[in-house]
Image (spheres, rainbow, N blue to C red):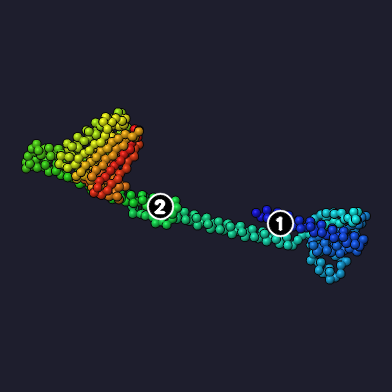
Amino acid sequence: MRNLLLSDFNEFVEGGREDKIYWITNYLEQRYQEEKDFNKVAEDIARLALIIGLEVKIFNDNDILVTDTHKAFNNALPIIKKRLSSFYGKVEGAKNKEFVSYPLFSGGEEIGTIEIRKLDDEKTFLFVKRTNQFFLISISISIFGALLFNFLLIRSILNPLNLLHSATSMIGEGKKNIRIHSKTNDELGELIESFNLMANKLEKMEEIRKVSIAKFAHELRTPLTIIQGEIEGAIDGIITLSQDRLISLLEEIEKLKKMVFNLEDLYKIQKKLRKVSKREVNLTSLLEDIKKVFHEKLLRDRNIEIIINVQKDLKIISDEELLNQMIFNLISNAVKATDKGFVKVNVLKEDETLIVQIEDTGRGIKEEDLPYIFDPFYSNTEGFGVGLTIVKEIVDILDGEISVHSEINRGTKVSIKIPI
């Protein structure tokens, strides 16, 4: 910017000097035409040229020096010399510059020549000096402003990042009640909001873990206490192990077995140890078999109707074992949550997608519990809370999608889409 500005300014100054040269040569020619004698006008012209910043040498048509700036200055009256002294001082500074010769004409004939050398202009020097100062100040202010803006910008970014770093470290140390308060609405604000959501879920999961351990211990303690009591009574001769008592003990052992198997299934599926074995599956038969199991075991004393809606002989290529466990777990959860009404299963095939919908008229799920229902050991009913976790893992293995919609005291609807 400075170079462009000075270049334009120098062109402007140079144009002004060329105008002065044209003017002084033209004026000299006019004066000569009036006086017909260089000696009468040359010194006046030389002094006038000095005032406008030019050093001159004037020659006649025989190339004889008529006068120059030095002679004109020295021959001037004292009062004029005093006025010209400030201009004359510039002559010494122009010695390294060369004279440029211009011919003089009068009436179409050459009457001589004038040699001109441009003197330094203090105003031009002052302008350049001021320009340098202005640019130095401008650059200093710009650099300071940029550094200040950069500092504030980095601070606005680093402060939230430092808070995130500290909060993450504290969560890593086991503190779950850490939250970050930020008023920013940018990407960092969204990151902080996501962190707070993660911290909320971790804290909730910690509560679930503690409750689940206590619940797990209670679920194990009950059948173990019953079995221990029966066996100790039999050893002491207080209790006779009749067939009915043995059947009761066997039921308690079945409960323990079911708990262990549920945990084992969850472990296998989470570790993806179970390989997907795809083959032709008759979903109509599979659903009828599942319905019979629930009618025989779970619905003897329950006023619940299981409704299966599936087209006749619906066959797909998929993993029968995974599908069986997924649908069984969903129906089981729906039955546990339903005191009366129905559990409806809708299964259909659309293009290359299997759609499974399990709907019940049960107690429903609270809105604040919905984000956690697929987490291990999360349950607000009887059982461990691993059933839905296993369902979610199976859906993921089969590259499907699962969604849940629920209303308190009106029921729950689970929808699953699986590519086939």
Identify the residue shown where x is 23% and y is 45%.
361
Q: Which mark is residue 9?
A: 1
Name which quarter of the figure residue 99 lies in. Answer: bottom right
The foreground one among 164 and 289 is: 289
Q: Is any part of residue 70 visible from this angle? A: no
Q: Give the percent coordinates (x, y) of residue 8.
A: 70, 54
| Dot 2 amino acid type | Ile
| Dot 1 amino acid type | Phe
| Quadrant location, the C terminus | top left
Identify the residue shown where x is 30% and y is 28%.
280
Q: How many marks?
A: 2
Q: Is any part of residue 385 visible from this angle? A: yes
Q: CA distance from mark 1 to mark 2?
A: 55 Å
Left or right placement of residue 153 versus residue 408 in this view: right
Name which quarter of the figure residue 117 lies in. Answer: bottom right
Q: Give the percent coordinates (x, y) of residue 322.
A: 28, 34
Q: Earlier in the sequence, mark 1 or mark 2?
A: 1
Q: Give the percent coordinates (x, y) of residue 241.
A: 8, 38
Circles 1, 2 touching at the beta carbon (< 8 Å): no
Reply above or below: 398 against 194.
Answer: above
Name which quarter of the figure residue 118 lies in. Answer: bottom right
- Depth check, mark 1 against mark 2: the one in front is 1
